[in-house]
Amino acid sequence: SDNDSAGLVFHTNGPVTLKNADVIENKSWGVMVQSDEAGTVTLASLYITDNGLATDRAGLLVETAGSIIITDSVSAYNGRNGADLYNYLGYGTVTVKNSQFNLNKATGLLIQSNNVVTLTNVDAWSNEYFDPFDPGYGVYIDNSWSTAGVTIYAPAAAYPTDYNLYQDNAAGGLHILTNGAVSLAKIDAHENTGDGVSVENLDLDLMKPVSVVNSLLTD
């Protein structure tokens, strides 16, 4: 914590595992992971907060050709996005579970992927407007490099709530760009300045389905 640059930096060609870490008040990124190969990046039980406030950096940056798995983590109060997850140059999936991306200076959770994206019990609220190129979504997903789908859901008796909460964000609550099927369940999107939920299925010739069930879209 309180470093003049990033808190934790990984440059590797292999898998990365980081668990049970508090990353606080660093002047650049809180956590940066860059892997040129297809090793899986596994992050669990991280508390990433108040990073990059002087340098407009995200709390978490992951760039890899492999899969990204995040569980039981918080990224909040950071100088730009809560988390930037990029694996669109490879074929790995993105899975985020039981995590929160709140109160950041721009978008809470940004994902750009070439494969399936799955979110389970992910909250993103009160993220701010940064600039016209990053207007402050709760969650922004773009996996339009392929025809893979996007699934967001919350099982019964989920923690911390039984909905994926996207509230009070400067742009929309949830924005998805895809060429694949979209399945959304138990979404609570309200009081966002833009759309609560926006899905752009870009290749209409593919006729991929979009499903929204058991959700609250209000105000």
Image: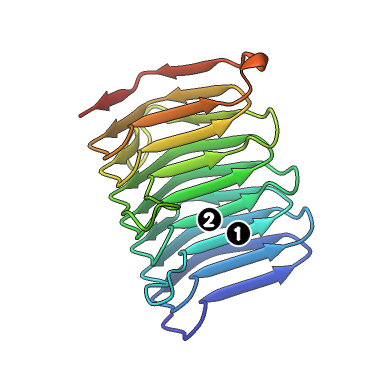
Provide the secondary structure element on which disc 2 rests. strand
Q: Is residue 47 above or below residue 123?
A: below
Query: Residue at horizontal 60%, vertical 59%?
Result: 62
Image position of 146 (left or right of 99): right
Image position of 145 (left or right of 1): right
Q: What is the residue that sits farthest to the left in this orientation?
A: 219
Give the numbered dot on residue 62: 1
> Can you give x and y, in whole percent of width and height, for residue 207 in the image?
62, 13
Image position of 196 (left or right of 28): left
Amino acid type assigned to the residue bearing label 2 in the image = Asp
Give the numbered dot on residue 84: 2
Q: Is residue 132 above or below residue 142?
A: below
CA neighbours of label 2 inside 10 A, class few (<14), some (14 to 19), many (20+): many
Query: Residue at horizontal 35%, vertical 39%?
Result: 172
Provide the secondary structure element on which disc 1 rests. strand
Q: Quadrant of residue 8?
A: bottom right
> Can you give x and y, in whole percent of width and height, for residue 4 in the image?
47, 86
Image position of 74 (left or right of 188): right
Q: Quadrant of residue 93?
A: top right
Gap in Å between the C-alphas at discs 2 and 1?
A: 6 Å
> Can you give x and y, in whole percent of width and height, for residue 115 in the image?
68, 37
Q: Are marks 2 and 1 in contact (CB under 8 Å)?
A: yes
For marks 2 and 1, the one nearer the N-term is: 1
Query: Residue at horizontal 70%, vertical 33%?
Result: 146
Amino acid type assigned to the residue bearing label 1 in the image = Val
User: Coloured how?
Assistant: rainbow
> Quick one: 26 or 99, which is closer to the camera?
26
> Can you give x and y, in whole percent of width and height, for residue 89 in the image?
73, 49
> Quick one: 64 or 96, which is closer to the camera?
64
